[in-house]
Amino acid sequence: MRRMILAVMLAGSAHAAQAADMPDFSNFALRGPVNSGVVNWQGYYAGGQAGYGSGDMNFAGSNQGLIGQALGPNNILLDTVSSVSQANGKVSVRQTTFGGFVGYNNQWDDVVLGVEANYMHGKFNGASIAAPVPLTYVTPFSDGLYHTVGLVSSRSVSISDMGTFRARAGYATGNFLPYVFGGISLGLANLSSSVTITDRSANTFAGSASGPLTTYAANETITGKMLYGYAAGLGTEVSFGAHIFGRLEWEYLRFVNAGGDININTVRGGIGYKF
């Protein structure tokens, strides 16, 4: 009996010694291993930011549907007016912005992966108007008449609030965390469009038609329209202590349902707090 007790005691001692030498994987499972020479970016964070941005807007073809609405589906001018230049100016605007962000980081040694919600406020207002010289057609239309057709087409967009939901990946080096990100973009906008089409017709061609003037018009205003698209960018953060960090980043947004090709680039700096 004494031999059995002695053997159990020896086995227990050996097991305890082995357990003491084994690494603790609980912290790895919950937080990921953190290199002692690298700042710990693990956890929730929030902060504020301000920046400067440029918006590039191209309204080519943006009023095509409104032209069809003004003329109606069977109007003999429809194909003709659709080929005329319409609200196709490219507009660039500049604007200061401000906002905030919240997110969560998970860290494995030098690798940091996270998710973030980001908000920016700024008035990106762009407008374009096209009023080409009325065209006189040298061949009669299907009604047997010669026509002089004019078009005035305008389009404006005002984007006030923008947000992104991002996934991001970074590599911690010393006090710095360079990162890239991508995700979806949302925007709140007011849209306004109008078209005015004029038509004069005559039985004979004499350089321009001189018949009675017929006018077709349509307009559309949408307030509080939700825009959507995608976002991408890169940046870096620097730790100033256990909880405070600074940020500098570039962000690219594109909205795909704004009735035109709209791209917004911003450069911003921010201060955050890691909980």
Image (cartoon, rainbow, N blue to C red):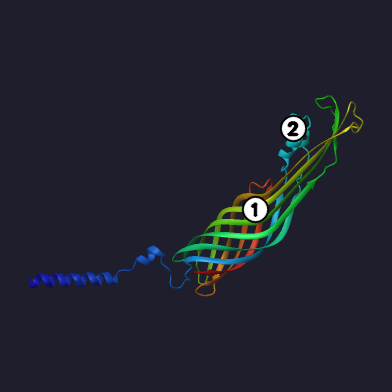
Q: Secondary structure at mark 1?
A: strand
Closer to us: 216 or 181: 216
Residue 100's x, y, as percent?
59, 64
Position of 54 compared to 203: left or right?
left
Query: Which quadrant of the figure has residue 76?
Result: top right
Amino acid identity at mark 1: Leu
Instruction: Say left or right for 241 vs 215.
Output: left
Q: Which callout, 1 or 2, points at the residue further toward the start of the chain?
A: 2
The correct choice, above or below, for 58 with respect to 102 in the image is: above
> Quick check: 229 above or below 251?
above
Location of residue 265 by image quarter:
bottom right
Density class for disc 1 (Cα within 10 Å; few <14, some 14-19, many ≥20) is: some
Judging by the rendered image, the residue that carries numbered circle 2 is 72
Q: Residue 146: x, y in percent?
A: 86, 29
Would residue 10 be found to the left or right of residue 127 on screen?
A: left
Whole-number angstrom distance, CA of label 1 to CA of label 2: 31 Å
Instruction: Report the disc number at residue 188.
Output: 1
The image position of residue 161, as x and y in percent, is: 65, 57
- Judging depth in this view, the residue of 169 and 161 nearest the camera is 161
Amino acid under disc 2:
Gly
Q: Which residue lies at the image location 74% right of the left edge and 32% below the top edge? A: 72
Helix, strand or loop at mark 2: loop
- From the top left corner, tell me how far across and down residue 271 is, in percent: 58, 69
